[in-house]
Image (tube, grey):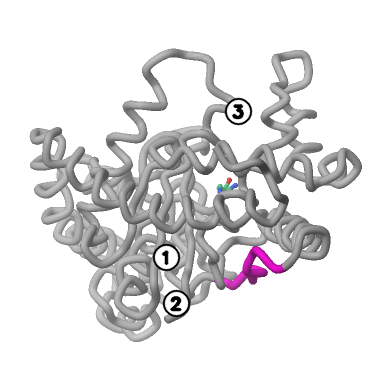
Amino acid sequence: MTRVLSCIQPTGEVHLGNLLGALRGWVAGQHTCDAFHGIVDLHALTVTETPGVIGNDTLTLSAMLFAVGLDPDIATVFVQSHVVEHSQLAWVMECTVSYGELSRMTQFKDKSTTREGSFISAGLFTYPALQAADILLYDADHVPVGDDQRQHIEITRDIAIRFNHRFGPTFVIPEAVTPAAGARVMDLQDPTSKMSKSSTSDAGCIYLTDSPALVMKKFKRAVTDSETEVRYDPLAKPGVSNLLDILGAATGRPPAGLADEFTQYGPLKTAAGEAVVELLEPIQLRYAELLDDRGELARLLRIGAGKARTVASATLGRAYGAIGMLPA
Ligand code: TRP
């Protein structure tokens, strides 16, 4: 079975765009591939200075991943820092990648420019080495990523090829794949931008923890256009088409066909809001249960960490062995 690794940083809340665009695909994928899902808290450390934040974000994100339907007995859901091999292999990766290669990473160039004047950790620079360790530890065949991460998969391949060449065949060479196409959910206030937690106002972003009343309010205030016709036309009518897309994704129906069922914007907003409330209800119930039972949540994460460590420690052992490190 193809081994697939996806990782997500515990930074902030999960929103409807994450659910419909990615997480639902993860849930379906756990039955068709050997799925590993890492909550990469060590990566979030590159930009965190406040105590207590990462741990709490890790806790809520893991509860959400189980609540949306990842099954700890099928998929391997783990927290990166619970599997010490990530840090250990990351150093080996740092010694296999060059300063020049890391300097060419566009994400580093962008992030260090935006943070100019503030603290830029060395971790922000060596981050791709840690990411390479994440991937190579699991012998991942496929890594589904968006375009912004392609360069990181490319450098991981370069590192793996270099290591295998120097020390003998050790790592599986991973491939970047395009994630199974989910719905592209746009901001309700600015339907030409993707829904995102970093957008300026929360009014356009539906968080998975939003109450039914808040979800309905955000949909009622969704930006449409000055016409009145309900028609699926993402270019000319981005707001209305986004509502149709969301309604379609939440109810499993094609968005273009739904347009015929509405003659006014108001009822479409209500229908989309109600469909999302209904979609979120069981997720929110399970999420609340898990957050109320930290022991159970910890147990689920221990299952994942155990499975992940079995694979990761074997790979690290292989890498140390290939280099010829003196066994402890
Ligand atoms: N760098 C990725 C991001 O910012 C997160 C990530 C860390 C990742 N390790 C990974 C993604 C391994 C895929 C595979 O989104």
Q: Which of pointers 3 and 2 lies earlier in the amino acid sequence? A: 3
Left or right: 327, with 275 as reference point:
right
Per the rendered image, the range of residues in magenta is: 169-178
* Other-residue count near label 3 (Cα within 10 Å), few / some / many at <14 / 14–19 / ≥20: some
C-alpha distance separating marks 3 and 2? 42 Å
For label 3, being within 8 Å of ligand 1 is answered no
Q: Nearer the viewer, residue 85 or 40?
A: 85
Measuring from the top left, give residue 124's x and y in whole percent: 69, 31
**Residue, disc 1:** 240
Residue 202 visible within the image: no
Q: Which mark is residue 46?
A: 3
Name the main secondary structure of what is drawn in magenta.
Answer: loop
Using the image, determine if residue 214 lies above or below residue 220.
above
Q: Which mark is residue 232?
A: 2
Secondary structure, mark 3, is helix
Secondary structure, mark 1, is helix
Whether the residues at callouts 1 and 2 have beta carbons within 8 Å, the answer is yes
Measuring from the top left, give residue 258's x and y in whole percent: 30, 80
Left or right: 69, with 254 as reference point:
left
Q: Is residue 176 magenta?
A: yes
Residue 247 visible within the image: yes
Q: Residue at x 56, y 50 (%)?
A: 316
The quarter holding residue 20 reads: bottom left
